[in-house]
Amino acid sequence: MTKISFASHPFLLGFEQLDRLVERTAKSGNEGYPPYNIEQSADDSYRITLAVAGFREEDLAITLENAQLVIRGRQVDDSEGRVFLHRGIAARQFQRSFVLAEGVEVAGASMENGLLHVDLRRSVPDTVVQTIEISNK
């Protein structure tokens, strides 16, 4: 069966990268841990908030890889020598990925009350009108 993509349409020249981006996003994990919010705080700024209760700042890593924001958490399991009657809070690792549009950059990150906030800012380029000269050959 042949795979059909929207970037193969003849009017969409140069959108192959967008097609790969959509495919990469569709393949990303769809798990629900940790829960997160995405909010728009202004016309050109966003905030991603992850609930990372139990994680310390040194347990978290935030990287930007090929326009993809990757947030990883890894807790050290310190349960050795402890006897649990019930263990509902597991020390587990996670990885959350967010694909950023061109021009969106990470403005900073902070932790507050078990919530990790990652602030994003969109740099709006100036609108440029370009006139194309027609040459005689």
Image: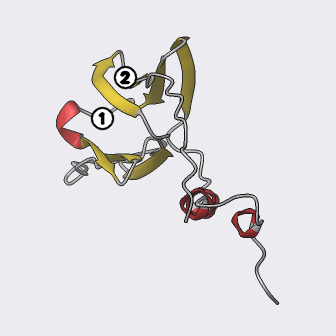
Name the side, left or right, on which 35 lies relative to 85: right
The circle on residue 18 is none
SS at mark 2 in the image: loop
Q: Position of residue 65 (x, y in %)?
A: 32, 53
Disc 1 and disc 2 in contact, CB within 8 angstroms: yes
Q: Which residue corresponds to the image point at 63% horizontal and 62% vertical from the top-left?
A: 19
| Figure check: 124 above or below 69 | above
Q: Position of residue 35 (x, y in %)?
A: 55, 35
| Figure check: 81 above or below 14 | above
Task: Using a 10 Å C-alpha cutoff, classify the residue at mark 2 as few (fewer than 14 neighbours), some (14 to 19) or many (20 or more).
Answer: some
SS at mark 1 in the image: loop
The amino acid marked with disc number 2 is Gly
| Figure check: 82 above or below 25 | above
Q: Position of residue 78 (x, y in %)?
A: 21, 48
Give 41 or 7, whichever is nearer the viewer.
7
Give 61 or 32, whichever is nearer the viewer.
61
The circle on residue 55 is 1
For marks 1 and 2, give the CA distance: 7 Å
